[in-house]
Amino acid sequence: MVTDPLIGAASDRLSLPLGRRKPWLVLGAPLFMLSVWMIFVPGESASAGYLAFWSAVLYLGFTMVDLPHKAWGAELATDYDERSRLVNLLVVVLLLVLVLLLVLVLVLVVMLTLLVLEVVLLLTPAAG
């Protein structure tokens, strides 16, 4: 999409007391969270245009967080080996968080299934 090179170039050129990358994270994270909410909890009158708009905002918010975050990691390290270790750490932490989230979803699904089965059993009249 066209936002990637624009955000990347703007992130490289921005110079604020907070730094070049942090303002993008501060602005992009709420935009990303709001758009996720608007997509996954739409109103009853949500149309295709509504979903297209919030999908574009979601992509923009993600780009505003993702690109500067990756560039920031490259700036924190001074040499190739340090950058490799930093990226390795980022990937490992990301994978651990994803596995933790998947386990959490699995536990919630199992708990919800058991709850539904219990309600069905309570509402089903006993035979005989």
Image: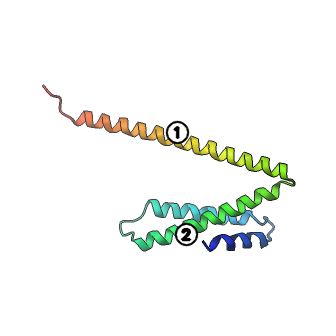
| Image-quadrant location for residue 15 | bottom right
Left/right of residue 82 with respect to residue 112 in the rendered view: right
> What x and y, as percent, mark residue 111?
41, 37
What residue lies at 80% left-to-right and 52% top-to-bottom? Answer: 83
Q: Is residue 93 above or below residue 45?
A: above
Q: Amino acid at mark 1?
A: Val
Q: Secondary structure at mark 1?
A: helix
What residue lies at 73% left-to-right and 46% top-to-bottom? Answer: 88
> What x and y, as percent, mark residue 61?
60, 65
Q: Amino acid at mark 2?
A: Val
Q: Which residue in the structure is indicated by mark 2?
A: 57
Q: Is residue 29 above or below residue 103?
A: below
**How far is disc 1 from disc 2 in space, using C-alphas?**
29 Å
Q: Which residue in the structure is indicated by mark 1?
A: 103
Q: How is the image coloured?
A: rainbow
Proximity of marks 1 and 2: CB atoms separated by less than 8 Å: no
> What x and y, as percent, mark residue 86?
77, 49
Left/right of residue 93 with respect to residue 47 in the rendered view: right
Towards the viewer: 33 or 105: 105
Towards the viewer: 85 or 117: 85
For the N terminus, the image quarter is: bottom right
For the C terminus, the image quarter is: top left
| Image-quadrant location for residue 19 | bottom right
Towards the viewer: 9 or 31: 9
Q: Is residue 119 above or below residue 52?
A: above
